[in-house]
């Protein structure tokens, strides 16, 4: 089970002609943890996710996934362990049918088609999209595309999920389903987003980035109620905490994230 | 201008498909072994980009007319000739399937006319030569417009050649040529201008896209090899064509005779020719042949009405069959 | 603009058609590709004046349409749209050859166009791009080419929609109708850059799922008896009407009756 773990040791990254976008970051995420990654545009969220998936190679420092250090040699193995969901599901659904898209990953690893079909069914069922199996992917709604794009990485049976803005392109209903599904996953998760309410409901731990550095790493509850720090980093309080005077008091209402949050919403309305 | 199935003979269509598949295969191997696989999704989306871009009509100020992008040249500029050619080939196949723009048998003709010349003639020998003097607005425009004109002129010439070689019409070579080339001059200029606008926009905003391409293609291309194999294949096709012409005088040669204005056929009259042919073909029914020959002498009206009658009867039966199937399906709920 | 919208509708229409479950839909795509090609070859191998011989070829589209329940009107509309070029050539030919022969050529070009266009449209409408791609793979078309075909097809819809938005935004701000050539760079150039960035993301999402330049398609297409029968019956019919003049035969019958 140790391969569900992520560890960064003094990781820095710099684009060839650019300045440093990730500056000396270290953290450790253990098995089954769900971590929110927040920060203003350009804070380095996406770059960090790309580093974790090996799309970019750090200029300094080490990334360890499970017990394996991420290098060019271990890339293939590590990518099997990691599922990366892109911000725009259309970037991930490049085949014509849902089935072919979900099967694309396993097929590249030479798995036979009977096993692939089982995996596709399982992955689609997991996100409640089994009925879409034979649909053309362009015919899906925004919410359906999101679920299918998650299924395309689930079919690889990863241990770790990296999500870039999973709630973009979603209507409130679809967003709610997404939250429920995310909470049902036992995977280690890192969710990079501007949707702080989503973080509130799906992540116990949050990492706040500013200009490529970690400003805060700890309890979601502590950071998302810290109005001053959030505003310094170009963010603001989650919507459900904005309408009342004492956010910390409100937060106690949403202790059990999923149910409590809905109360928060109804209160607001 | 897409070549369509109705204008070509199987021989011309088939040899063009063989010729262009050879070029496609060669290009695929080039990409496989010489480039990284990053190109694959780029080709896919660029194909879709050109496909969509082709559908925008730009009005040409002061003329009241409009034109659109063809894209062959643009693809070579951004993807290099090999990937550009393959991408154009996939666009043409999708067009043939979805819109029946150019037919399936004419597919090879279209790949040659609209894809090959821009990628392997105009791009390396004109565009690159001019651009190698440096990117400037003037160079981009001269290079794009000249290359587009040349590839469209070659394409138009091919359309004429393919049509005449197929011999499905009686259009004389020169008349058709004189009609096609000037039209395609105008189309070529518009194509060149649109291409130049897009290239200079990209150069202004993200020059590295074009500069990277330059480096990438410089040493990796072997145009001589391509040109030599193209000439070889053309010669081979020509050989097959002339062999065919000599062994089936009434196929190809007939059409060539016709287009060069052979007296013999004029004298004989196309009308007689028609019946001569028909009689040969219905010789399974000698009875009828006899009857037909008699009718023939009655003149035009009699025979053409009888042709119409038989045709309508046949069509009627076909439609009845279709109707019966529909009815049967409805009543049996299949 | 209207062309963009039209194309979207056409692609969606054909996709919807291909989701049908009729007998024709269930025929092996390789067989359908082959039958269509043989059909087109037979049709175009007839000479310009052999109008009568073309008529029996109508049986193929009629049977496919009636067996597959493909709506006929959009097919015919597309067929008509594809005609002007060929009619132009036919008319030009008629100008040069003002006699019955010219007229016959005109007619045969027209009929050949209708037949070839209909048969290609029916192929995609009853098979779908996806299955055609699988068929092409089975026919040994290179994998990279087929992957290109599928990706291009997939993104055509997305890009066409995006382009419609751009063009709308332009037209809302412009006084005259249409888009001036001057703005080609702005509209298409910007669009190109978006597409270029897009390709990077797609590539990333492909390699993260183990893509290594090879393209693997799943299930093999299986042949059933009905596929073989379909193929053989049509070949027999095409050969028959190539060598036997059905129209004359009907005339003969009509002649006997009257």
Image (cartoon, coloured by chain):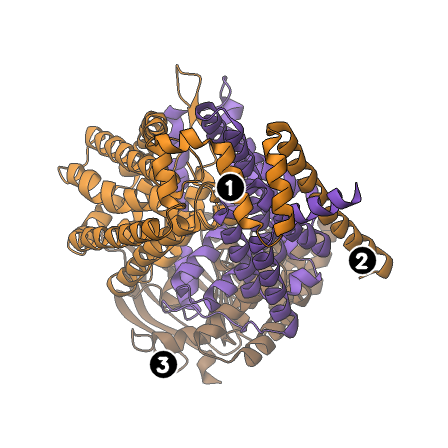
Chain colours: A brown, B orange, C purple
Q: Nearer the viewer, residue C97 or A166?
A: C97
Q: CA distance from mark 2 to mark 3?
A: 63 Å
Dot 1: within a 10 Å radius of its alpha carbon, few (fewer than 14), some, or many (20 or more) residues? few
For the residues labelled 2 and 1, the Cα–Cα distance comes to: 44 Å
Which-is-in-front pick, marks 2 and 1?
1
Q: Which residue is mark 3?
A: A68
| Picture quadrant where residue A180 is located | bottom right
* Point 77% across, 55% down: residue: B325
Q: Are marks 2 and 1 in contact (CB under 8 Å)?
A: no
Residue B318: percent from the left, percent from the top?
Answer: 71, 49
Q: Which mark is residue B276?
A: 1
Residue B99 seen in this snapshot: no
Point out residue A223 in the picture as x, y percentages from the top left corner.
51, 59
Asked if C130 appears above or below A269 in the picture, the reply is below
Numbered disc 1: secondary structure: helix
Closest to the observer, C72 or C131: C72
Question: Which is more foreground, mark 2 or mark 3?
Answer: 2
Residue found at the very far top of the displayed protein: B62
Q: Nearer the viewer, mark 1 or mark 3?
A: 1
Residue C195: percent from left, percent from top: 41, 46
User: Which residue appears at 55% of the width and 76% of the height?
Assistant: A116
Image mark 2: chain: B
Q: Which mark is residue B329?
A: 2
Label 2, secondary structure: give it: helix
Q: Is B50 left, or right, of C73 in this rendering?
A: left
Q: Position of residue C13 (x, y in %)?
A: 64, 47
Q: Residue furthest right?
A: B331
For marks 1 and 3, give the CA distance: 83 Å
Is C253 left or right of B298, judged from the image as shown?
right
């Amino acid at each position: 089970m140790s391969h569900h773990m992520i560890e960064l040791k003094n990781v820095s990254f710099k684009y060839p002609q650019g300045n440093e976008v990730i500056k000396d970051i270290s953290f450790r995420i253990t098995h089954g943890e769900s971590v929110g990654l927040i920060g203003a545009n350009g804070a380095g969220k996406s770059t960090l996710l790309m580093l974790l998936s090996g799309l970019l190679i750090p200029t300094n420092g080490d990334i360890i996934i499970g017990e394996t250090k991420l290098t060019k040699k271990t890339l293939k193995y590590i990518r099997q362990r990691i599922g990366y969901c892109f911000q725009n599901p259309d970037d991930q659904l490049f085949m014509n049918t849902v089935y072919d898209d979900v099967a694309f990953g396993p097929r590249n690893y030479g798995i036979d088609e009977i096993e692939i079909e089982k995996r596709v069914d399982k992955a689609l069922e997991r996100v409640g999209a089994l009925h879409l199996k034979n649909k053309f992917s362009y015919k899906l709604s925004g919410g359906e595309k999101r679920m299918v794009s998650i299924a395309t990485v689930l079919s690889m049976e990863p241990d770790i999920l990296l999500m870039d803005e999973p709630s973009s392109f979603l209507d409130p209903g679809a967003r709610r389903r997404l939250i429920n599904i995310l909470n049902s996953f036992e995977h280690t998760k890192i969710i990079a987003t501007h949707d702080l309410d989503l973080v509130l409901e799906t992540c116990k731990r949050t990492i706040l980035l500013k200009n490529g550095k970690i400003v805060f790493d700890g309890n979601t509850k502590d950071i998302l109620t810290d109005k001053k720090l959030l505003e310094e980093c170009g963010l603001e309080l989650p919507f459900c905490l904005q309408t009342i005077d004492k956010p910390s008091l409100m937060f106690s209402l949403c202790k059990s994230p999923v149910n409590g949050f809905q109360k928060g919403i109804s209160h607001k309305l | 201008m897409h070549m369509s199935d109705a204008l070509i003979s199987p021989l011309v269509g088939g040899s063009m498909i063989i010729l262009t598949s050879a070029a496609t295969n060669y290009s695929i191997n080039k990409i496989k072994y010489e480039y990284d696989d990053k190109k694959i999704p780029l080709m896919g989306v660029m194909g879709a980009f050109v496909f969509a871009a082709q559908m925008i009509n730009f009005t040409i100020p002061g003329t009241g007319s409009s034109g659109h992008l063809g894209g062959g040249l643009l693809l070579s500029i951004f993807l290099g000739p090999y990937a550009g050619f393959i991408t154009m080939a996939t666009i043409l196949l999708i067009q043939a399937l979805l819109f029946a723009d150019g037919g399936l048998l004419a597919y090879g003709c279209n790949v040659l006319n609209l894809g090959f010349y821009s990628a392997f003639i105009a791009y390396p020998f004109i565009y690159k030569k001019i651009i190698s003097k440096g990117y400037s607005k003037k160079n981009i425009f001269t290079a794009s417009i000249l290359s587009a004109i040349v590839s469209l002129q070659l394409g138009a010439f091919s359309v004429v050649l393919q049509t005449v070689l197929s011999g499905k019409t009686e259009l004389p070579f020169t008349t058709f040529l004189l009609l096609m080339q000037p039209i395609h001059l105008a189309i070529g200029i518009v194509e060149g201008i649109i291409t130049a606008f897009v290239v200079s926009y990209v150069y202004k905003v993200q020059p590295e896209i074009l500069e990277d391409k330059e480096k990438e293609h410089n040493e990796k291309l072997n145009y001589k090899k391509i040109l030599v194999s193209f000439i070889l294949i053309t010669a081979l096709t020509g050989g097959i064509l002339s062999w065919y012409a000599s062994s089936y005088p009434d196929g190809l040669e007939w059409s060539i005779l016709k287009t060069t204005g052979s007296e013999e056929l004029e004298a004989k009259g196309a009308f007689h020719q028609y019946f001569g042919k028909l009689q040969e073909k219905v010789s399974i029914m000698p009875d009828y042949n006899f009857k037909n020959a008699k009718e023939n002498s009655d003149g035009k009206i009699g025979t053409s009405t009888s042709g119409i009658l038989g045709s309508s009867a046949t069509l009627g039966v076909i439609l009845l069959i279709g109707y019966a199937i529909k009815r049967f399906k409805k009543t049996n709920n299949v | 603009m209207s062309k963009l919208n039209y194309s979207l509708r056409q692609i969606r229409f054909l996709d919807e058609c291909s989701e049908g479950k009729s007998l024709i839909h269930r025929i092996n795509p390789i067989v359908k590709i082959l039958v269509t090609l043989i059909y087109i070859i037979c049709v175009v191998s007839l000479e310009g004046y052999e109008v009568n011989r073309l008529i029996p070829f109508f049986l193929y589209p009629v049977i496919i349409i009636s067996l597959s329940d493909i709506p006929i009107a959009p097919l015919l509309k597309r067929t008509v749209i594809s005609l002007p070029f060929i009619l132009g050539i036919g008319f030009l030919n008629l100008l040069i050859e003002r006699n019955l022969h010219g007229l016959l050529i005109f007619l045969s070009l027209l009929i050949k166009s209708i037949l070839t266009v209909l048969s290609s449209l029916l192929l995609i409408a009853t098979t779908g791009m996806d299955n055609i791609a699988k068929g092409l793979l089975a026919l040994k078309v290179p994998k990279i080419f087929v992957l290109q075909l599928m990706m291009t097809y997939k993104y055509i819809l997305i890009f066409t929609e995006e382009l419609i938005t751009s063009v709308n935004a332009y037209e809302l701000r412009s006084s005259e109708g249409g888009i001036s050539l001057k703005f080609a760079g702005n509209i298409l150039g910007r669009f190109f850059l978006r597409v270029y960035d897009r390709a990077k993301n797609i590539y990333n999402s492909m390699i993260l799922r183990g893509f290594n330049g090879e393209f693997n398609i799943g299930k093999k297409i299986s042949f059933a008896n009905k596929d073989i029968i379909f193929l053989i019956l049509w070949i027999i019919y095409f050969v028959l009407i190539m060598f036997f003049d059905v129209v004359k035969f009907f005339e003969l019958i009509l002649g006997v009756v009257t």
